[in-house]
Every structure is written in C-alpha cells, then in structure tokens.
Amino acid sequence: MRRGTIDIWYDRYSATLLRKFIEDRTGKRSPSLEKLCFVQQLVDLDANWTFRFLDLPPEIRNLIYGHLLRLRDSRWRADRLVCSTAILSTCKQIHAEGTGILYVENTFDIVVRSMANPVGHVPVNHTTVSFTKLAIDQVQLCDAPKSDVDDIWPTVIREAESIRLVVRLDIADCLAALVIPDFKQTNGVLHSLASSRSGATNLKRLQLVIKGETESLAESLLHSIFYPLTQFGKLTIADFAVRGLPDTVTAELQRLLRTGATRRYASLRTALVDQNTRAMRICNSARDAGCVDAVLERLARHIQRAVARCETDGVYLDAAYYAKLSRSLRLTRACLRGSAIRAVMAGLRERRAG
C-alpha cells in the first residue's frame, strides 16, 4: 500500500478533496499545491496522529466495553464462551468502567459433579468443579480439606453478580449397592462458595439447577446438601431460581434465605474458636500453677468437644451442625462466666502478684 514514502491510498482523491482533508484535520487554511504535496502532508499527519480512548464519550466507551467484555461464543470451541479482558489492564479508570459490564452483565457457569460415595467405599473422582464456557480448567477434589476447596474459586467467580450453578448428583452406584449416598463434599463446596472470603462474595443472582436421579434421595438429605446456599449475604428470593429440587425443599431454602437467619453462622465458628483459645489459656495457666478443680475438668471437656465440632471435614454443614456449634459456644461461655472459673482466675492473679 506504499509507493516509496507516499501512501497510494490518497491517490484516489482529487487535489481539491485532499486539500479539504488537510484543512479539516489542522483547522488551518492550506495554500494551493500540487496533489503530490497534499498526499505527503496527509502521510505526515497520519504518522504523528494519536488517539485517546478516554476522549470518546462515555456512551461510545460503554459500547466498546460491551463488545469486548460480554461473553460470546468461541469460534474455535463450541463449549467455550470468551471475552477480551486485556483492556481492563490499561488503566484504573478503564478497569473501573469495564468491570461493571464484565461482572454485572454476564452470567457465569459453575458445574459441581459429585459421584456418590457409598459407605465403606473409597471415593474416586469424588467431586469435580468445572467453570464451563470459561478458559479455566476443571478442579477435581478427592476428599480435599476445606482449605483446598476455598482455593478453587477464581477472581471472576469472586466478583460475579450472576451465576448459574449446576449440581449433578450421580447416585447410580449407590442404588445398585443399596447404600445411603454421601454428598458431604458437595455440601462443603457449596459452603465454600457461599461463605468463604474466596467464594462468590458479590453474588446477587443465582440460578440453581439440580441434575441426576435425585428422586430417591430423602428431602432431609437434599436440604442438608444445599443448606449453605442460604448464607449468601446479598441474595434475595426474587433472584434465587431453583430447578430440580422438590417444592418443599425449595420453599424451606427460600424461607431461610428470606429470614437471613443462617447468615450469622459465618461468624459462629470464628466465635467458638476464639472462646476456645481463651479457655485453653485459662486451663494451661491453671495446670502450670498446680490447680486441680472440677470446674477446670468440665472446661477441658468443653474445649475437647469444641475442637471436634470445629472440624468441617466429613460432616454436613447444615442446620444440625450449626446447632451443635451454637450449643458448644453457649456452654463454653457459660462455664467461663461462672463464679467457679472467676474464682480460679482470681486465685491465679493473686499467685502471680505474690
């Protein structure tokens, strides 16, 4: 497209039009010259021309953000949706303007597939978490501890306001073996998504789709599995769509979500751990001072129960679990506030002072 140093693209225009192009771009009146001179001037203007994206009107910038950041079908992979997020790394203003479209106007898919774990059998590929239609590899969990589960959520899920959550419960092996299925790890994954700092902390819209032969599962079991979804802090009933669960289970989940009663449970375990730490300090100080007292033995038993209940591996994080946590916290607090413990602490203070 170039002839020497002159771009032949301008050759198609007359000298009069080329002169007008120059005057429009420079805002100055141009003298009459030969066509070749006008072409050279325009080539020089092109070489020195700069464009500032932020000089565009906001509505034009939003159109560009929408084209780049809305999920669309990939031309290479039929099962992937893609968007161009590189523009968000340009500057703080563009990042602030673009993330609103990326995280608000897109619905991101998460698929949790759990193979039933028959009692007494070793799980294989127990739970798989896939971020479908995104360029993120699936994560396989084989009895992973909760700390590992919390690490699976990418930034796009943490910031997303709309998620389509597909949970597939495969129970064919359990039905054949006539055993009760175990979906405790699925329950832990949903708890991490709803309650952990690494989960979907900004979620405002959730589409829950349940797949698999779930008709044979007891409603109480289904309620236990999906109980953590009622702890989303910004989710309302109007934005909580459920498909594949019995109406009674759906109604109970919506009731808990409406009342917000389960949202305080996120801090219940932390409160119990803090109380336990305080109680352990008192017991250790009393033992070091040679104190032997029935109330200290009772406090030590509360500590042992609390430690066991704070373990989240292999248990359903449901209403029964939180009821046990609440009871353990209440008993530990009552013991610490009792007159007997206060007398022991007073005695310890006197010994230190003496």
Image (cartoon, grey):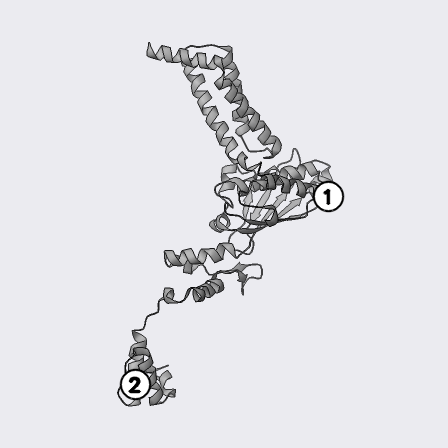
Residue 119 or residue 221, whichever sits in front: 221
- At a point 53% along the width and 45% down the height, the residue shown is 234
Residue at 64 percent across and 35 percent down: it is 121
Residue 291 to residue 180: above or below: above
Q: Position of residue 317 (x, y in %)?
A: 58, 35
Tag 1 secondary structure: loop
**Location of mark 2 (residue):** 38
One can see residue 186 in this view:
no
Neighbours of disc 1 within 10 Å: few (<14), some (14-19), many (20+): few
Q: What residue type is labelled 2?
A: Phe
Left or right of residue 187, residue 64 in this image: left
Residue type, numbered disc 1 = Glu
Residue 91 is drawn in which quadrant? bottom left
Residue 215: x %, y % from top left: 73, 43
The numbered disc on residue 95 is none
In which quadrant of the rendered view does residue 107 lie? bottom right
Residue 84, percent from left and from top: 46, 61
18 shown above or below 347: below
Residue 248 percent location from the top left of the image: 70, 41
Gap in angstroms between the C-alphas marked 2 and 1: 79 Å
Q: In this view, does 5 lie to the left or right of 310?
A: left
Q: Residues within 10 Å of mark 2 (few under 14, many from 20)?
A: many
The residue labelled by disc 1 is 215
Q: Can residue 163 be seen in this view?
A: yes
- Label 2 element class: helix
